[in-house]
Amino acid sequence: MTTPLTAFPADGYTARWQTWDGDGDETVTLRWENEGWTALGEVTRERVSYVLRLTATWQVTQFLLFRDQDEPDLWLGTDGAGRWGEVNGAHRPDLDGCSVLDLGCTPFTNTLPIRRLTLDVGDGADITAAVVDVETLGVAPVKQRYEHLAPQRWRYSNLDSGFSTEIAVDEYGLVHDYPEEFRRV
């Protein structure tokens, strides 16, 4: 049976995480705009900001990453059918088929597949994510698996590296604790 996630408040929502070792944090603010969600994130340890524009069903339409400039250092967009491109319109065929974006330095992007997959407890799904390296600005497809273990518990696995961890989420599907990486504050 699918455990329904609570809808985010229409007037927005803010969540904050701290790194496990306390040397950084992240704040993400969600706003409902133009029939979709906009996520604004600040990650202090990596000194980056990002903007994710999402459809009402949590599909990425646009991603902007800011490091040290007023203009985005990286801009990606998708047509919703798995075709990705850059700001100049250049098609990124290496990312075709990626269903989500994963910014490895934040627990927030784990929410995207959790909200999109709507898996029953006991079910799992393999996806391909466009994973962003904030240091090099490289973006590569990575095979991942999400398994819904309990109403507010998921297992995330990177199928390419073999890494796996269980993550606790809140009623919205936002990561609460990501062991040895992040915890909500």
Image: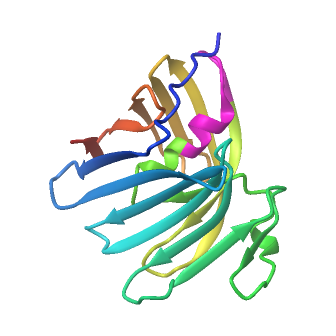
Front residue of 41 and 25: 41
Q: Position of residue 5 (x, y in %)?
A: 54, 25
Give residue 95's quadrant in the image.
bottom right
- Identified at 49% across, 16% down, the residue is 150
Give residue 87's quadrant in the image.
bottom right
- Identified at 49% across, 71% down, the residue is 133
Residues shaded magenta: 112-124
Image quadrant holding the N terminus, namely top right
The image shows residue 123, relative to residue 11, as above or below, that is above
Identity of the residue furthest to the left in this view: 22
Q: Position of residue 12 (x, y in %)?
A: 43, 45
Q: Position of residue 112 (x, y in %)?
A: 58, 45
Identity of the residue furthest to the top in this view: 1
Q: Could you tell whether 40 is left or right of 7 in the image?
A: left
The image shows residue 68, relative to residue 164, as above or below, that is below
Q: Position of residue 123 (x, y in %)?
A: 66, 21
- What colouring does the structure picture have? rainbow
Whether residue 174 is visible, yes or no, is: yes
Is residue 117 part of the magenta span, yes or no?
Answer: yes
Give residue 135's quadrant in the image.
bottom left
Image quadrant holding the C terminus, namely top left
Q: Could you tell whether 22 is left or right of 27 in the image?
A: left
Is residue 151 part of the magenta span, yes or no?
Answer: no
